[in-house]
Amino acid sequence: MTTLATVITGASSGIGEALAHLFAPEHQTLVLVARRKERLEALAKELNAKHGIKVHVIAQDLQEAGAAASLMSAIAALGLSVDTLVNNAGFGESTPFAKADAAKTSGMMQLNMVALTELTHQALPTMIERGHGRIMNIASVVAFQPCPYFAVYAATKAYVLSLTEALAEEVKGRGILVTAVCPGSTNTGFHEVANTKGSLLDKIAESPEMVAEEAYKALNNSKVVIVTGLMNKPVPTINRLIPRRAMTWAVAKMLGH
Ligand SMILES: NC(=O)c1ccc[n+]([C@@H]2O[C@H](COP(=O)([O-])OP(=O)(O)OC[C@H]3O[C@@H](n4cnc5c(N)ncnc54)[C@H](OP(=O)(O)O)[C@@H]3O)[C@@H](O)[C@H]2O)c1
């Protein structure tokens, strides 16, 4: 018999970990995915003890080509079918584009866009057949404008936002909730990895728990796009009112190296 599951990528820290705490009380089987297995196992133990739910851990590097297919096979081998997919794993890098490491840049595109797309593509047909499912894709406020010195990262998140909005329209009325989450700067491991630790972005960061709560509510209230944090709410409107070149210049001034 197939059991329905909630799959959360990037659950070993930050926003993904906070989301796992919110999905756990739903009492659906959880699948936690990331590379750091020990962290996932500790979280699985905690959630199992608190909520009495079955929590599976899959250590998987989603930057590798074919990772999404391997992950879906591993999930199927556990006798599980994806009912809720949270595409949260991702990272950024703040750097002048010309100086960016080529392998790191490709890995970022593979993780932030390709793995997210492939997982969604593989999970969606069964959700449509079942007439039920939820997909949460973590984008970012940087999805709304070009971001010099964060160029590739912002472009990957613009992709996530666009894909998610399009998908939400395609599945409208079929019982599937699709939400793009656009957090502003959040106090997680992200800044260490992105080379923005100690920067203005890091200083104005909000808590991952707050981001997760807004994201979780938005998904269940059928919101297609949610910008989390009061300070960030005006970002889409500002980007509609101010010419794109002026916004790009302003962001370059803010993020300039
Ligand atoms: N923090 C912010 O300011 C901010 C703002 C807007 C959007 N976001 C987005 O929010 C999402 C979560 O990030 P976070 O802020 O919570 O940062 P985080 O604490 O660094 O979490 C990132 C998660 O992604 C996982 N991950 C990274 N590379 C992976 C890989 N190759 N394969 C599988 N999993 C991988 C990490 O786990 P392992 O290292 O164990 O693999 C970790 O669980 C990301 O998509 C990020 O772009 C963050």
Image (cartoon, rainbow, N blue to C red):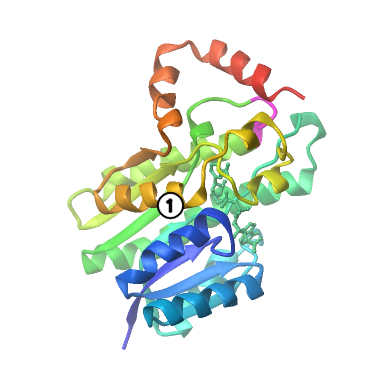
Q: Is residue 117 above or below residue 238?
A: below
The type of residue carrying mark 1 is Ala
Look at 32% across and 63% down and name the residue there.
125
- The location of residue 86, given as percent across then percent down, is 43, 59
Look at 74% across and 40% down and name the residue there.
195
Q: To which quarter of the image does residue 10 belong?
A: bottom right
Question: Label 1, on which residue?
Answer: 212
Front residue of this view, candidates 52 and 134 = 52
Residue range corresponding to the magenta coloring: 148-152
Q: Is residue 184 left or right of residue 193?
A: left
- The location of residue 241, given as percent across then percent down, is 40, 12
Q: Is residue 30 above or below residue 117?
A: below
Find numbered disc 1 in the image and state the secondary structure of the residue it sits on: helix
Look at 42% across and 74% down and name the residue there.
30
- The location of residue 149, given as percent across then percent down, is 70, 28
* Quadrant in which the C terminus is drawn: top right
Q: Is residue 11 above or below residue 5?
A: above
Q: Is residue 191 left or right of residue 234?
A: right
* Quadrant in which the N terminus is drawn: bottom left
Front residue of this view, candidates 106 and 255 = 255
In the picture as drawn, the residue positioned furthest to the left comes out as 173
Reply yes or no: does residue 60 show up in magenta.
Answer: no
Look at 37% across and 47% down and name the residue there.
214
Residue 32 in view of the camera: yes
Label 1 packing within 10 angstroms: few (<14), some (14-19), many (20+):
many
Q: Main secondary structure of the magenta part?
A: loop
In the picture as drawn, the residue positioned furthest to the bottom comes out as 1
Q: Is residue 4 left or right of residue 232?
A: left
Q: Is residue 136 above or below residue 41?
A: above
- The location of residue 244, given as percent across then percent down, is 51, 15
Front residue of this view, candidates 140 and 46 = 46
Q: To which quarter of the image does residue 251 belong?
A: top right
